[in-house]
Amino acid sequence: MTARVRVLVAAGSGTLGLRLRLMLEAEGAEVSMVTDMVAGVGSDVQLVVATPGQAAMAGGLAPGAVLMEVDECEDWDAMRRRLAAALSPQAATLSEADHMNAALARARILLVDDSATYREFLRLELTRLGAKVTACANAEDALTQLRQGEWDCMLVDLVMPGVDGAQLCGRAARLRRDSGRSFVLGVLSSREGKADLIRSLEAGADVFIGKSLDTALFRVKLGAALRYGGLNK
């Protein structure tokens, strides 16, 4: 994927504009936002993402610049795929495994586990795959980091003292919904029974990963959840 493509977003809706900015920045783009196209596009913009009404006013595009129309009713996963393809024409030729590995390699992951040993083990494994990992030991620190940073994924241990992983996922899911942000919520657990799986997913988790999985299975399960930012359970 070409890094730092310059993108102009003109969405009208504040919520749609925020979602588009987060999606584009997650793909490595440099994003500017306008409320309308009256001020003009600018000669350095390589991609213009706009709602139909705004797109109709997008005159004077620079040679080679691309205009992409989006609609608030469009499926978010489909929109994310179209944005990724617009940023990188080569992306259309990549296999699903390539997309999965690329998602892992650029992921910003917040890892929460009260076990220092497992936390460091997983941090090293994820870093080896290319992810940028920030580790926390408890829910309070994790929520602070979650509010202050930009993340593609939060992985939380199910069994923790005080606020456990399912409760933390519930709070993070509400934050995600209220802020319009998009990140994957994953639960890690050494208890891999049906009841814990159901409780975690009902609390807001998108993926449940057993700690007994070997590193190859862990990689593909997390990578599948991150691949298009979708909710792969």
Image (spheres, rainbow, N blue to C red):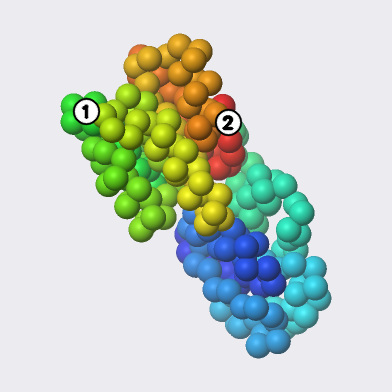
Name the mark on residue 158. Answer: none
Q: Is mark 1 on a helix, strand or loop?
A: loop
Q: Residue 208, percent across and down?
A: 47, 25
Above or below, 113 relative to 131: above
Q: Residue 21, percent across and down?
A: 56, 63
User: Front-most of 104 and 23?
Assistant: 23
Classed neighbour count for the residue bearing mark 1: other residues with Cα under 10 Å, few (<14), some (14–19), many (≥20): some
Q: Which amino acid does label 1 sit on?
A: Ser
Q: For the point 48% across and 64% down, which residue is it?
A: 4
Q: Is residue 77 left or right of residue 105?
A: right
Using the numbered discs, state the Cα–Cα distance from disc 1 to disc 2 in whole angstroms: 26 Å
User: Front-most of 145 and 40?
Assistant: 145
Quarter occupied by residue 219: top left
Above or below, 93 relative to 10: above
Q: What residue type is labelled 2?
A: Asn
Q: In this view, does 161 lie to the left or right of 214?
A: left
Task: Name the image quarter holding the C terminus.
Answer: top right
Quarter occupied by residue 20: bottom right
Q: For the point 38% across and 50% down, which residue is it?
A: 146
Visible in this render: residue 1? no
Q: What element carries label 2?
A: loop
Q: For the point 74% across and 67% down, which residue is it?
A: 51
As drawn, the residue found furthest toward the bottom would be 39
Q: Residue 183, percent across and down?
A: 49, 45
The residue that mark 1 highlights is 115
Q: Residue 64, percent across and down?
A: 67, 71
Q: For the point 62% across and 68% down, which residue is it?
A: 14
The residue that mark 2 highlights is 232
- State which mark lies toward you, 1 or 2: 1
Classed neighbour count for the residue bearing mark 2: other residues with Cα under 10 Å, few (<14), some (14–19), many (≥20): some
Disc with the residue nearer the chain's start (1 vs 2): 1
